[in-house]
Image: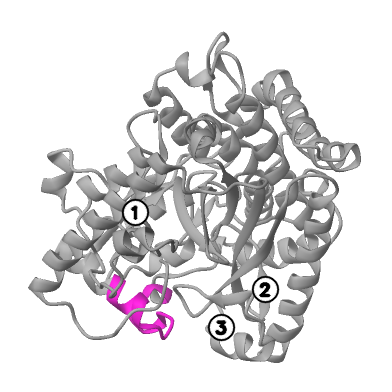
Amino acid sequence: MGKDLLSDPFKPRDRGKYRRKVQRCLDTLARMLSDGSFSFPRKHIGFELELNLVDDTMRPAMSNAAVLEALDDPSFTTELSQHNLELNVPPRPLAGDSALRLEEELREYLDAAAGKAQTAGASVAMIGILPTLAREHFDQKWLTNNARYSLLNDEIFAARGERTVLSMEGAGLAGQQPERLRSFAESILPEAACTSMQLHLQVAPEEFAAHWNAAQCLAGIQIALGANSPFLLGKALWHETRIPLFLQATDTRPEELKNQGVRPRVWFGERWITSIFDLFEENVRYFPGLLPETDSEDPIEALESGQAPKLTELRLHNGTVWRWNRPVYDVVDGKPHLRVENRVLPAGPTVLDMVANAAFFYGAQRALAESERPVWTQMSFQAAEENLYAGARNGFDAQLYWPGIGWIPPDELALRVLLPLAYEGLRRSEVSEQASARYLGVIEQRCLAKRTGATWQREAVARAQERGIDRDTALAGMLARYLELSRSERPVHEWPVE
């Protein structure tokens, strides 16, 4: 969410001051876009990864402070719950063998984290939702000791005025009826159950809209091909349960506001865009400030003096609107730039699978963004949103809409249409043939096998229950085997189900 915050409670006058400052930041951004204030030497990519810590019984290990102290590496930071870590990999160009080096570096970072976690009696788990989480792990006492997390928790609950309701029904395990979850939480810690990988792409201002629209078109297929979050609180739910869980965990709307059509803060959006300004302007227009803290900078004065304005309040506000594809404004070495942040995918199952997911996204996104007749001019925005929820609920069993084809399963859409586009997009990005073949080959084989992390988890638990093992024991045993296989060089489509 941009930065650490003060721990003092906000006062009513803070909100008016914050609103005016956010608007001034927005006006400054408009001037910057109009004046061509952004330098753009080359496309860079970035990678963030959220992680879980588990103990020897496969339950959450609330030890992130000890692990971070042992790591002593600024690439690793806290996340919402004490069983979470976040890894921020340094940005790099997309071209050449960069993806191969990213894979190698990720393994080095994760090996280091695993070693330090072991000294604290924990293991590192890359998975979309930890299947052994229980309701007691959502107690507010497990919030990471950081003022921004407790303030965010308090502000969301103050806005909603009631407990978090977790309510969803998913796709049943093989041969079984669908299961339903209905639970409550007294904190926003269910959000901490949602551990993801986030992909960043730096783009020129005039290219942003096409790349964001393309990312929105790809969200449903990304989820279907990369699902890895099928269990929550002991229930088999969506293939990618992160999607509804994140929405419900951070929802500031009581039922009455939902019924009025008030927009949720976890948001797909509602229209195709023509500029990055559209997204920031929507965020300011539709969503009240959750963390109304201001700094002393006048952004217009900073711009007129030749400096890159920090736009602190606009960035902080943007960090409390959780779009699945988020606009990012940032300043590095005194130079402002813009990024698309893709937040759709879960963590795991393996490093190879995650880099393959990234390569597929970057390649297909570029090809779609540069197409002569953009795909988003041929489909409604609502169809793209429905694809997201269909892919999340049903994985490879979903039916997705694609222009010129109609309704099509995700594996067929990828094999027939999007993998060839991804190869072309990576070629235009000057990615090496070796890297393209390695990572897109993983996606191809995953489609042929119809096996994601979610399908493997569901099959493993169903097999264990067929042998008479109860659900909780089956989940813990599955997770232990998952962690063993995730450390191997084998992508998930090659994992055996025993």
The residue at 37%/59% (across/down) is: 303
Residue 470: x %, y % from top left: 57, 62
SS assignment at label 1: loop
Depicted 212 relative to depicted 408: above or below = below
Marks 2 & 1, CB-CB < 8 Å contact: no
Q: Magenta segment range? A: 137-152
The reply, left or right, for residue 424 in relation to residue 50 is right
- Nearest to N terminus: mark 2 or mark 3: 3
Residue 252: x %, y % from top left: 23, 57
Amino acid type indicated by mark 3: Asn
The residue at 18%/60% (across/down) is: 19
Amino acid type indicated by mark 1: Val
Can residue 315 be seen by looking at this rendering?
no
Front residue of 259/90: it is: 90
- Nearest to N terminus: mark 1 or mark 3: 3
The answer for how far apart the CA atoms under marks 2 and 1 are is 28 Å
Label 3 sits on residue? 64
- 10 Å neighbourhood of mark 3: few (<14), some, or many (≥20)? many
Can residue 311 be seen by looking at this rendering?
yes
Marks 2 & 3, CB-CB < 8 Å contact: no
**Which residue is most to the right?**
434
SS assignment at label 3: helix
Q: Name the chief secondary structure element in magenta.
A: helix
